[in-house]
Amino acid sequence: MDENKCCCCSEEVNNGVIGKYVCYCNHVSEQDIIQAIENGATTVESVIKVTGAMKNSNCAVNNPKGTCCYPDFVYVYNKYKKI
């Protein structure tokens, strides 16, 4: 398993972000990800580190989708990353 994914990651599925947060376990919003990118984070891993996403993971309970947030996180990162 990728060390940057949360402990409940088992598959790479993304049906779009729903709700207020991308990472519900640590209350990381799409705006938090955008801000990290604007402040110089250049990889998914660096955005995760800056935002504090995917620590204390319990996505099956906290995420309304009942799945890991990592695919959603990557989706949002790719949407806003600087090219």
Image (cartoon, rainbow, N blue to C red):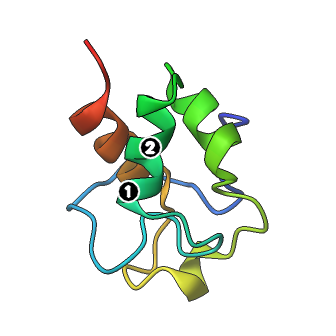
Residue 76 in sight from this viewpoint: yes
Rounded to the nearest angstrom, the CA distance separating label 2 from label 1 is: 6 Å
Residue 82, position as x, y percentages in the image: 30, 19
**Secondary element type, mark 2:** helix
Task: Give the percent coordinates (x, y) of residue 48.
Answer: 61, 42
* Amino acid residing under circle 2: Gln
Locate residue 37, reporting x and y percent.
44, 32
Q: Mark 2 highlights which residue?
A: 35
Count every numbered label the image shows and give the total: 2
Q: Is residue 27 above or below residue 50?
A: below
The image quadrant of residue 21 is bottom left
Mark 1 neighbour density, 10 Å: few (under 14) some (14–19) many (20 or more): few
- For image coordinates 65% across by 69% down, the residue present is 26
Q: Is residue 80 left or right of residue 59?
A: left
**Mark 1 — residue?**
31
* Residue in the picture at 49% in, 19% down: 42
Q: How many residues crowd around disc 2 within 10 Å: few (fewer than 14), some, or many (20 or more)?
A: some
Give left or right: position of 28 versus 81. right
Q: Is residue 79 above or below residue 41?
A: below
